[in-house]
Image: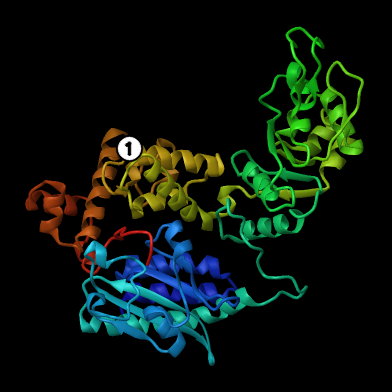
């Protein structure tokens, strides 16, 4: 057996035997089928126990939007029939198949190739199926591919069953993911479960975590999944408002209550009546404002600035901070009574470096979002760029990733987001793959050149002549660059880069 296949199977078996969760083993496995074996759009679809439909659990080469859309009814298409029969299926040419459902819309894009589907079985039960494309197959390839997928399907059974099993305390193994949040890591599933538990109530929630981890999105999810979802969701950034006006912003003011108060004005609490108020960076509130906020939390009433008439409100409070409130309690800059009123139901959001399994999901989401908004036809992220994304420490968390992908989309000229399109902060020596070191301008140019050569080899399946034409250089120049960068074109002979073909498979 080829060494790369052994490495792939060994990695999967090691992950399963160590008790890893399904999400942790799927990404490397599906990427490995593409990078090491040359199979396109490798995916795992699992049977939904509620309606029996097959839904994509994970895929390589599909955007997050496509992954969410694609599903098969029982018996529909090759995937549905293969699951119903519990037997592997090989379609040598999808263009000649009347059964292939073509959720990819491949035919309308003029694409052809072979399609393989292998059920994931546990005894007599069929849990789902692994499927993939091979764009330019021969008969030997397809039978070897089928055997490999069968081995992987067998290895996946324990982790698929573990995902569907209830833990000892009887709770469901995973809460539904809020619509506006992205992530399948264990740390994020813990967040989803807490959101699901507290959202239906009016309990005060305190969101903790570093800047850029998505606290506002979680606050919005808590509001949207609550009985207050049709009422206002009012946001207040306590750090952005000067101390001199924050009281007026929160509680409103009467006409003539201070210089410039020419009219009566409702505050944010009054505007949020019946709904939710999100107090971001609550640790930046001045001590005198903390006292008045404490009264609102205790008595659900306040007075406008310049008025002695109490106003009652029915508002759910969600607060957030990136500061160490416990240290602030010690030095007296944050009131202990307010802290305990806010800290009724704390939710800590993980830093991006602690949920690395979500980096590619988020990057793909932002790529699709910004490519659409900027009118770019960028379909995928190059492997070298993925290596940089995965090795970087992300001090700015999800916000930094979002900004980095938008910058890269604006710089990209073709249909692939390359490593050199990413921000300079990701190009630091500790972030670079393949041992590339920081040697100034020449090292940077060499890294970009190597990146372009490797991507061309992937796109043209190791065909040096075709690569030379695509890069607009001679075959001799192509050969010199391959030797200079120590690249072996033979490893790409059975490799084809992902082709973005539409919104459905």
274 horizontally vs 406: left or right: right
The image quarter containing residue 266 is top right
* Residue 3 falls in image quadrant: bottom left
Q: Position of residue 215 (x, y in %)?
A: 65, 43
- In this rendering, the answer to whether 490 lies above or below 312 is below
Residue 185 located left or right of residue 248? left
Answer above or below: position of 253 versus 150.
above
Give percent across and percent down for residue 84. Answer: 46, 87
Quick check: 80 left or right of 244? left
Which residue reaches farthest bottom?
Answer: 124
Dividing the image into 4 quarters, which one contains the N terminus? bottom left
Residue that carries the numbered disc 1 in the rendered image = 411
The x, y position of residue 464, in whole percent, is: 13, 58
In terms of depth relative to the viewer, which is nearer, 391 or 41? 41
Image point 41% across, 49% down: which residue?
368
Residue 438 visible: no
Residue depicted at 66% across the width and 77% down the height: 165
Nearest the viewer among 197 and 154 is 197
Q: Is residue 241 above or below residue 101?
A: above
């Amino acid at each position: 057996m080829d060494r790369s296949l052994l490495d792939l199977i060994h990695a999967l078996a090691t992950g399963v035997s160590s008790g890893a969760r399904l999400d942790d083993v799927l990404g490397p496995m599906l990427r490995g089928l593409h990078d090491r074996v040359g199979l396109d759009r490798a995916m795992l679809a699992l049977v939904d126990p509620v309606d029996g439909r097959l839904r994509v659990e994970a895929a390589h080469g599909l955007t997050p939007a496509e992954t969410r859309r694609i599903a098969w009814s029982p018996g529909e298409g090759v995937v549905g029939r293969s699951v119903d029969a519990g037997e592997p299926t090989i379609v040598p040419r999808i263009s000649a198949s009347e059964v292939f459902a073509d959720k990819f819309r491949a035919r309308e894009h003029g694409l052809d190739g072979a399609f393989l589907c292998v059920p994931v079985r546990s005894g007599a039960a069929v849990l789902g199926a692994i499927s993939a494309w091979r764009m330019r197959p021969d008969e030997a390839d397809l039978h070897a591919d089928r055997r490999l997928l069968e081995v992987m399907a067998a290895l996946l059974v324990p982790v698929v069953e573990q995902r569907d099993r209830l833990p000892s305390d009887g709770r469901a193994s995973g809460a539904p993911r809020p619509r506006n949040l992205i992530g399948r890591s264990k740390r994020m599933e813990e967040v989803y479960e807490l959101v699901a538990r507290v959202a239906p109530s009016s309990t005060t929630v305190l969101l903790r975590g570093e800047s850029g981890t998505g606290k506002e999105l979680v606050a919005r999810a808590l509001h949207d999944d609550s009985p207050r979802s049709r009422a206002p969701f009012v946001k207040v950034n306590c750090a952005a408002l000067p101390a001199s006006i924050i009281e007026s912003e929160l509680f409103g003011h009467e006409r003539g209550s201070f210089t410039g108060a020419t009219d009566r004005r409702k505050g944010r609490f009054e505007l949020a009546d019946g709904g939710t108020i999100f107090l971001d960076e609550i640790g930046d509130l001045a001590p005198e404002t903390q006292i008045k906020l404490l009264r609102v939390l205790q008595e659900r009433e306040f007075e406008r600035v310049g008025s002695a008439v109490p106003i009652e409100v029915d508002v759910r409070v969600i607060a957030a901070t990136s500061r160490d409130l416990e240290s602030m309690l010690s030095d007296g800059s944050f009131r202990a009574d307010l802290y305990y009123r806010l800290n009724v139901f704390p939710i800590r959001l993980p830093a991006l470096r602690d949920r690395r399994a979500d980096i590619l999901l988020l990057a793909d989401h932002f790529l699709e979002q910004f490519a659409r908004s900027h009118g770019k036809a960028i379909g995928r992220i190059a492997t070298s760029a993925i290596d940089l994304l995965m090795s970087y420490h992300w001090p700015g968390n999800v916000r930094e990733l979002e900004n980095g992908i938008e910058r890269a989309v604006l710089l990209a000229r073709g249909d692939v987001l390359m490593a050199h399109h990413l921000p300079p902060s990701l190009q630091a020596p500790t972030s670079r793959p393949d041992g590339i070191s920081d040697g100034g301008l020449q090292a940077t140019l060499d890294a970009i050149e190597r990146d372009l050569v490797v991507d061309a080899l992937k796109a043209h399946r190791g065909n040096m002549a075709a690569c030379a034409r695509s890069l607009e250089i001679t075959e001799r120049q192509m050969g010199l660059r391959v030797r200079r960068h120590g690249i072996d074109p033979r490893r790409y002979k059975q490799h084809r880069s992902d082709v973005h073909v539409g919104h459905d498979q």
